[in-house]
Amino acid sequence: MDIRHLRYFIAIVDSGSLSEASRRLHIVQPALSQRLSSLEEELGVQLLVRGRSGVAATDAGAELYQRAKIILKQMDLTKGAVQEKAGAMKGKVSIGVLRTVASVMGARLFLALKSELPDITPELVVGYSAELKNQLNSMRLDLAMQVYRPDAKSENGIHLFRERLYLVSPRSIFDPQQPVKLADLEAVPLLLSSMQPFYGFLIDAAREAGVDLAIVGGIEDGAAVLDVCRAGVACTVVPEIAAQRIEPNSGLSVTVIDNDNLHREIRLESHPDIPKTGAMMAVEKVMARVVTDFLANRQ
């Protein structure tokens, strides 16, 4: 079992078929099949189940897949760490950025990273917290923004910022000058996507307060949600960073929700089993500073 075997095996699992893996690896399929057979023979276990629609990993294969990803990631990081000792901090750093953050400061983050770390290639991947967590766990990302409840304890990563949640409603329903209590949302039609990280926070806080929320549906697209609210059909909840982008003449009322449990903390995390390189730590510092400066100037 060598590194080439592991790279080939990962490609087969990721591709879902030998033919597609063969195409991606630029190796003929019989040779790839032979590599797989020799790997299974050496380990003494079946790694893949072959079917009409392609191949899938067995339990043993899934274990090898996860360990192989860690091994190869460690090799890539080792190369970077050795180069950094010689004074050459370079390479690609993939960073998961939350959708709400990317919409207001994605370009600012990218430009700062390119300006201050010219030998590092930043790759920003946008998604929801759960999506980015999955990609971080599978080592497709080096760093990823994550959303936590205000009372959650996490020792991984660095704190970026904390923000409140806001109710967005047709202007005729709520006064934007008066904070909204959870009790005020009783039976108010709410448009909420379960993909939003704070969805669970809101449900739990309402349950603890004995408030029955009337969730009438959800749309993942932020602009479409606001259009529905503007039409007077429903209200929605957004984080502070998104609330402050809604224009005063939008026909919408933006009101802070007065509840200590309805904050969200944003952290920038790395994989717990993978040591950080100097490049990753440099990216963390730049991102933390850019976010802090942006929020300070926003006030």
Image (cartoon, rainbow, N blue to C red):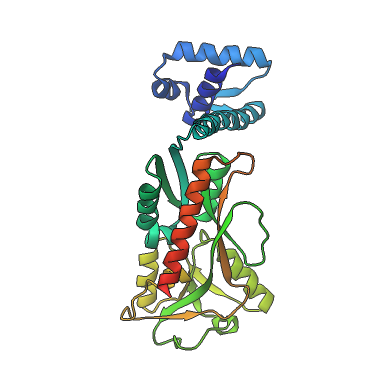
Horizontal relation, residue 56 to residue 107: left or right: right
Q: Quadrant of the N terminus?
A: top right
Residue at image x 66%, y 73%?
A: 207
Q: Nearer the viewer, residue 269 or 192?
A: 269
Q: Position of residue 72 (x, y in %)?
A: 55, 28
Q: Is residue 273 visible?
A: yes
Horizontal relation, residue 201 to residue 227: left or right: right
Q: Position of residue 184 (x, y in %)?
A: 56, 84
Q: Above or below — where is 15 with respect to 272?
A: above
Horizontal relation, residue 215 to residue 221: left or right: right
Residue at image x 55%, y 81%?
A: 185
Q: Position of residue 5 (x, y in %)?
A: 55, 18
Q: Nearer the viewer, residue 65 or 297?
A: 297
Total number of numbered labels? 0
Q: Above or below — where is 50 with respect to 194?
A: above
Residue 146's image quarter?
Answer: bottom right
Residue at image x 37%, y 71%?
A: 245
Residue at image x 55%, y 28%?
A: 75
Q: Above or below — where is 82 with respect to 27?
A: below
Q: Position of residue 223 (x, y in %)?
A: 35, 66
